[in-house]
Amino acid sequence: MAEHPAYPVGLRLTGRRVVVLGGGQVAQRRLPALVAAGADVQLVSPSATPSVEAMATAGEITWHRRRYEDGDLTGAWYALIATSDPEANTRASAEGERERVWCVRADDADEATAWTPATGRSAGFTVAVLTTDAEDRDPRRTAAVRDAIVEGLHDGTLVAPHHRPRATGVALVGGGPGDPDLITVRGRRLLAEADVVIADRLGPRDLLAELPPHVEVIDAAKIPYGRFMAQEAINNALIEHAEQGKAVVRLKGGDPYVYGRGMEEVQALAAAGIPCTVVPGISSSISVPSAAGIPVTHRGVAHEFTVVSGHIAPDDERSLVDWPALATLRGTLVILMGVDKIGRIAETLTAHGKAPDTPVAVIQEGTTAAQRRVDATLATVADAVRAHEVKPPAVIVIGEVVTVGPDASRPQD
Ligand SMILES: C[S@@+](CC[C@H](N)C(=O)[O-])C[C@H]1O[C@@H](n2cnc3c(N)ncnc32)[C@H](O)[C@@H]1O
């Protein structure tokens, strides 16, 4: 059987009976893909791992709590034989052969009538890798080939030109807090497919350097706006490039909808009739504290966290924030865009009841090589920010969570 290479095929299993024998680690690894393919999965096994059991409890598979018996493969289109009993596996294999049911065998690939390829998904493709020569089977290398293809499609290093017209329009991509590894897989793929990228100052700017030369990269802060507001000029630039039939990525820091004016851009594009897709991003409000060793919640310490913009001082009439109410909250306060106003913010919080010795951490340029953290209290934070010359972008975390991590007693930056 091993003399010829395996014949690759994609099975369409929706509603079709698939029998899985054995509820151990192999089943646990394979079941999600079978369920995702819509198969009618019948698991036969006296026991199962907690994850497999959870799938049965959730009704995703049907579990027969017993050992394999002759006849279990009746009516099956496909079977996975993975019990811990070699003798049962051999009998099941023989039944599969008799009944013409393609069978994968976890314990003996040579005896199997089907092999499971190493699979992955990217950019709308399923990548499935099998070794050609059965004698050369090397699962790690097969998985490495799969990973290389999937990764290459994700980040655009594997160039697969589109032969059908691409869907153009604008993708509003949340780029994460700055570390290029912290953008989503979807965001990275759209970036790799873009003709034009309009980027903010914040976010994963290192990724821009990797773009091929034909991609036009526009710095949003440098778009001349003449008689328009800066945001209007950005909206216009998005619309103009999209109307030329280009694939446009609007790359933003963090998440597009967290102080990112993302919805204004979505509204402008909708008004111009331009298709727009929004890719969520990892917001700095959670990821920057996390990267600095601060959990925004911690059992027994903080059951809530509130994210607040500090760009308008508490006593400014334009402020929409109820600072006195925030002072009464027990949980964590995360302040974005608050470096300039931290003195007034700390005074207001203490004036309304927050303890002056409440711990505060200020994290500048989180997740980047330049990340630094300054620790203080509400009473000292304004001086600390000045003394350490903290500059935006920075996230300010106020609350007991600041001191729960193993790094909490570290000296100030
Ligand atoms: C206009 S808001 C945009 C927030 C973004 N949409 C998000 O979800 O993270 C900009 C503020 O986010 C915070 N910020 C963004 N990236 C940061 C980083 N890498 N380190 C520290 N603060 C950051 C700073 O408070 C900065 O002033």
Image: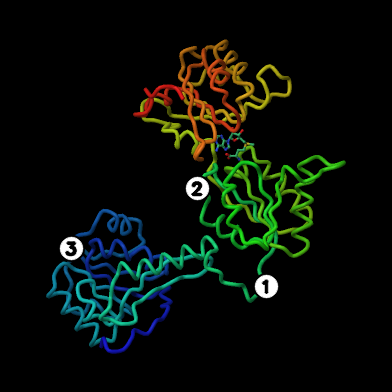
Question: Neighbour class for label 3 at 10 Å: few (<14), some, many (≥20)?
Answer: some
Q: Name the residue tied to disc 2.
A: 182
Residue at screen point 40% across, 75% down: 13
Question: Neighbour class for label 2 at 10 Å: few (<14), some, many (≥20)?
Answer: many
Q: Name the residue tied to disc 1.
A: 165
Residue type, mark 1 in image: Pro
Separation of marks 1 and 2 at Cα, in angstroms: 30 Å
Left or right, 48 with respect to 325, comes to: left
Residue type, mark 2 in image: Leu
The mark nearer the N terminus, 3 or 2, is 3
- Let me know if residue 170 appears in the view: no
Mark 3 residue's CB less than 8 Å from ligand 1: no
Separation of marks 3 and 2 at Cα, in angstroms: 42 Å
Confirm or deny contact between disc 3 and disc 2 (CB under 8 A).
no
Residue at screen point 34% across, 84% down: 6
Quarter of the figure with the N terminus: bottom left
The mark nearer the N terminus, 1 or 2, is 1
